[in-house]
Amino acid sequence: MNVQVRSDHKLSPVVPLTQYTTVEKKDVELILVKELNKVQYTNTAVIAVPETRVPVSSSEDEERETWGKKIDFLLSVIGFAVDLANICRFPYLCYKNGGGAFLIPYTLFLVIAGMPLFYMELALGQYNREGAATVWKICPVFKGVGYTVIIIALYVGFYYNVIIAWSLYYLFASFTSEVPWLRCGNPWNSPDCIDPKLLNGCVLLGNETKYSKYKITPAAEYYERGVLHLHESEGIHDLGPPQWQLVLCLLVVVFILYFTLCKGVKTSGKVVYITATMPYVVLFVLVIRGITLPGAMDGIRAYLHVDLKRLNNATVWIDAATQIFYSLGAGFGVLIAFASYNKFDNNCYRDAILTSTINCVTSFFSGFAIFSVLGYMAYMHGVNIEDVATEGPGLVFIIYPEAISTLPGSTFWSIVFFLMLLTLGIDSSMGGMEAIITGLTDDFKILKRNRKLFTFVTAFGTFLVALSCVTNGGIYVLTLLDSFSAGTSILFGVLIEAIGVSWFYGVDRFSEDIERMMGFKPGLYWRLCWKFVSPAFLLFVVIASIVKMETLTYDDYTFPPWASLIGWGITMSSMLFVPAYAIYKFLVVRGTFKERLAYCITPENEHHLVAEGNVRQFKLKHWLAI
């Protein structure tokens, strides 16, 4: 009799019949299954159980939701990975670190670390069909890593949604005949506000202030005084009340996220048809318009200039390593969550190559849209590109809006630009919240049965905390969260994740799991990267992030020491889940010290082997396997 069972878990010693599915339903025979020493007893025959049989862990796994179409998954992953940082950060980093030369370390780290980590997380989620926490049934002692990344995703949601709310605010403000940041003389402007046309190279050089740092232009004052009300706060100790306009925008963002996610990936997988594709349409239009502007070619040449001498600077390599890691979005639990809704035999190898490549190409292409406009700005004011080049909010909420405000049809260009920022942010935030929801609902079944309510509580909870970021001094809270919530902690989490999968679970066993799904085993290159290169890369980035840590500032404001202590408290609050859960797991398991250790590092479906004294991790062969 030919019986094939396919799922994504290994066999446990005693498994009920209801936990198995058969691929070939034509072979219908009632089988009373009890597995003992890899022998299957039926009412008619004794059949050796092949190593590749994989059972379903529970009846709930058989009913697990899957993506409606393959394209839903791909667009969701691309939408998450391609976010505001692709526009705000990469082009400036490339320009600052040697232009085209920066692409050498960036591409190198993509190939040896970025793609392998991306592939690992997709395969891990797809095979086990679990969220970031419960996926660690493969090595229970590491389950704390899952909680770490879930907490980090929650922290990021506290402030990331505020940036989306800013984009929505600007979008609404753009529906006027003249954008409000074009001129001085508005209620929010200071007496010092100056028309940008009066700022030329001589004035700027005389004040030794870069144009991008000038705070008295209409665009700069609209952002800091009209939107943030930063002038009404003296620092992080003086937050003041929330701004009702931003509160409403934030509420709209939260409701969009709730109604998108409350019914699962069947719904969110359709929303990304708009949110993941629109940025590409807009980006293409902005590039076409940008290159027609006077001075655009100077900006593009500055973006692409090749300065190989910059590669001698260690900072360039650190920036490339950090950027490739954050750009791909590994470690936030999102890739694991998204992949867990794939069909078991989906080719996640091809998906990893495709989506990570698209993400990096998007970052590079966006530089043409940014630097063509920066070249135009430099041309208008008679300054060098370096005087207008900047990154972060200053780029997308001050410099770029100011540039498009001077174009014919500025209202249209402003609407288009901020619509792109809105969609870039929404699908990335959707990914982060889905990681939280999937990770916890897979771990706590009561939450899964009440997914809509839990989604509402999560979304509304992020809204309440985010209110502190839309106060007069909210930018200080946002800067604090941005610096400490997902910096060293996320790097540490992914480092432990890579060690857990590659060393404790085993690259060879992980490769066999992939072979069960796709029919082929990962090549030696991928296995070497998983076991040696990726952990070494992550360790390097962790150390670099700590060494580069500087006193926290926002423009000329320096955060007080107590604020930095709060920041480190935020960082440690997520990282401590790793050792805390490991200690907890060791204490609750029964047995001798050696048996407890064995149970902690052995996959849950192999715990019967511990009782037999057959612990794979206690053998040298396990640690040498590739």
Image (cartoon, grey):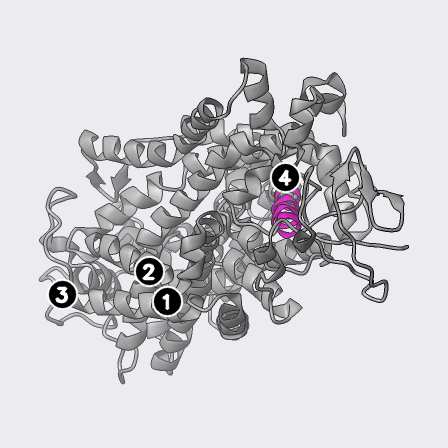
User: Label 4 sits on what residue type?
Assistant: Ala
In screen coordinates, is 107 left or right of 421? right
Q: The residue tagged with tag 4: helix, strand or loop?
A: helix
Which one is in front in this view, the residue at disc 4 or the one at disc 1? Answer: 1
- For residue 459, which numbered disc appears in the image? 2
Tell me: residue 500, above or below residue 351.
above
Secondary structure, magenta segment, majority class? helix
* Residue name at image x 65 percent, y 28 percent: 503
Q: Nearer the viewer, residue 585 or 458?
A: 585
Viewport quadrant of the N terminus:
bottom right
Q: Residues within 10 Å of mark 3 (few under 14, many from 20)?
A: many
Q: Which residues are magenta?
A: 113-128
Which one is in front in this view, the residue at disc 3 or the one at disc 2? Answer: 2
Tell me: residue 565, above or below residue 130.
above
- Residue of label 4: 113
User: Label 3 sits on what residue type?
Assistant: Asn
Q: Residues within 10 Å of mark 2 (few under 14, many from 20)?
A: many
- Residue of label 3: 189
Q: How many marks?
A: 4
User: Pointers 1 and 3 in contact (CB under 8 A)?
Assistant: no
Q: The residue tagged with tag 2: helix, strand or loop?
A: helix
Which one is in front in this view, the residue at disc 2 or the one at disc 4? Answer: 2
Rendering coords of residue 148 (x, y %)? 43, 39
Upstream in sequence: badge 2 or badge 4: 4
User: Label 2 sits on what residue type?
Assistant: Ala
Q: Residues within 10 Å of mark 1 (few under 14, many from 20)?
A: many
Measured Cα–Cα span from mark 2 to mark 4: 33 Å
